[in-house]
Image (cartoon, rainbow, N blue to C red):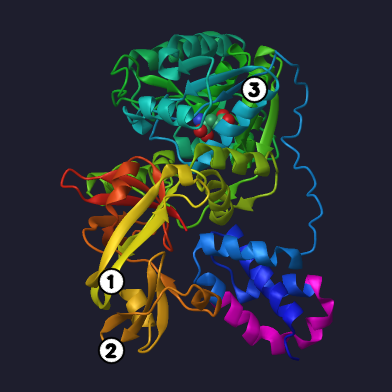
Amino acid sequence: MTVDQGLRDLIYALALKYAIKYGGKTSTKSLVGKIIAIRPDVRSKVREIIPEIERIVKEVNEMTLEEQKTLLEKYAEMLPEEKPKEEKKGLPPLSGADVGKVRMRFAPGPSGPLHIGHSRAVVLNDEYVKMYKGKFILRLEDTNPKNVLPEAYEMIKEDVSWLGAKWHEFYIQSDRMQIYYEHARKLLEMGKAYICTEDPEVWRKKKVHGGKIPERELPPEDQLEKWEKMLDGDYKPGEAVFVVKTDLNHPNPAVRDFVGFRIVEEPHPRIGDKYRVYPTYNFAVAIDDHLMGITHVLRGKDHLVNTMRQEYIYEHFGWEKPYFYHYGLVSMENVILKTTVIKEGIKKGKFIGWDDPRLGTLRALAKRGISPEALRKYWIDVGLKEVDIKFSWDILYAYNRELIDRKANRYFFVWDPIKVRIKGTGRYEAKIPKHPNDLSRGYRVRTVELPTEVYISRDDWESIKEGELFRLKDLFNVKRVKDYLEYAGNDLSIIKRGSKIIHWICGEGIKTVVYKPDGSIVGGICEPEVLESVGKVVQFERFGYCRIERLPDGTVVGYFAHS
Ligand code: GLU
């Protein structure tokens, strides 16, 4: 089949549209279905038009985003009118939620700063609290002294604030030990808990296989006596635990009687050696959720068994239960989240800190210029769905691109630069807008006097054949002759004919290092105006969005967000 003009224009239009949507690049594979959807007649002959699609995709991919946008205006009429998208619904309503009465909490353990996984709970709780004009409680769950990082208390507050959530009340569990002790005593008095001094493994086997646990049957007086001994230090760690009674016939052995307190002799990093008996997560969380009047608990499906355990505490005390929601789990690829791994890596100098761009911490995302609004949008989309999902970096990046593109100034960054001579005569001026859609931000103005030398990326140089005509973006056209370039006028129509447009630096560039999340490092030079954007996100043209910092020696550092 020959590709007629109409079909060719349609391919251009689609290639431009989707390249723009995804930051400047598209692919043949992704376009084929879209072409067939509009032109079903080509379905049976698709193989014959693939070379033409490939050619157009290549041409479009080599344009800058701005050129693509300009060209799309010309082709836009080829595209069928889009049906208005169904209005995206926000979060589903919560059961039993009354405006003004909702109380929800985010309750992380201070073992490190927050990572992407945590941000889901922050965003969902905060969104619902806002939706119902309720109260948001931030509670740090630090009753496992072995799992506490002192700096994390402050870091978590900063991370929650960065996400745009405001807490109305703040608690730290290690301040509430006496409250947990009081409730422990009450449960012992009610015969709903016992002190177990059996070998942990023997006790566990009895629960699974149904053996007798004699200590479980002892009267409250004996239990209280042993509890006091536990507190007084008469037992060593592992010799005695406080156990909450549940149902020894519960179909899930994990729910049968669970540990509510254990002895820990290491000093607590925050409160020292004041206590040696600490509540478990399941005990403290149930007491606090009740006392803090939490109405709705949102947590991952991995907490289902914990919820069942906690419900026994509510039942023993006769408390009304909150509404529990368990959302699906999110698996994440290509990212480091584990606190222990990160801590070790920082100690060994493998990571620069908790904000190393290879990490999935919120501070690493912030450093790279991922905006909290993008994350928020992502988690609201995912909502409370119960199915497990795979985290999509592409979607997060697409949301982020939408948010930062307006703000990001454009600059040239020549990675892996080589110096190439341009022959010719005359003086030329390049006036390049810092943002193509906002000329009020000004221009980068360069005067180039020929003959001269320019820096271009080695990749570009190697991709250009001898005799090939191409364009130095916003300056003029050049032709490669052996190992140098020759001035070749300023006829813009070469772009339309598929010539490459590459970026360049003439004169002083600033030494630049870009750190990518995959651990790779890209070195090069950038335009001096980049220094106006320290602390901000810029777009290095044909490379991607980076957040800029500057080293004391003047080197520009870019933390790569995405393309
Ligand atoms: N500290 C718990 C966690 O971070 C809280 C979970 C919950 O109780 O919902 O997993």
Q: CA distance from mark 2 to mark 3?
A: 67 Å
Q: Main secondary structure of the magenta part?
A: helix
Q: Which mark is residue 487?
A: none
- Front: mark 1 or 3: 1
Tag 3: residue type?
A: Val
How packed mark 3 is, by other alpha carbons closer than 10 Å (few <14, some 14-19, many 20 or more), is many
Which residue is disc 2 drawn over? Answer: 482
Residue 79 vs residue 300: left or right?
Answer: right
Res 264 → quadrant: top left
Q: CA distance from mark 2 to mark 1?
A: 22 Å
Which residue is disc 3 drawn over? Answer: 129
- Could you say where residue 549 lies in the image, as x and y percent from the top left? 29, 44
Between 262 and 292, the one nearer to me in the picture? 292
**Who comes first in sequence, dot 2 or dot 3?**
3
Look at the numbered disc 1 and give the secondary structure of its residue. strand
Q: Report if residue 64 is visible in the image.
A: yes
Q: Is residue 334 magenta?
A: no
How packed mark 1 is, by other alpha carbons closer than 10 Å (few <14, some 14-19, many 20 or more), is few
Tag 2: residue type?
A: Lys
**Who comes first in sequence, dot 1 or dot 3?**
3
Tag 1: residue type?
A: Gly
Look at the numbered disc 3 and give the secondary structure of its residue. helix
Residue 54 vs residue 49: left or right?
Answer: left
Range of magenta residues: 37-58
Which residue is disc 1 drawn over? Answer: 426
**Which quarter is ligand 1 in?**
top right
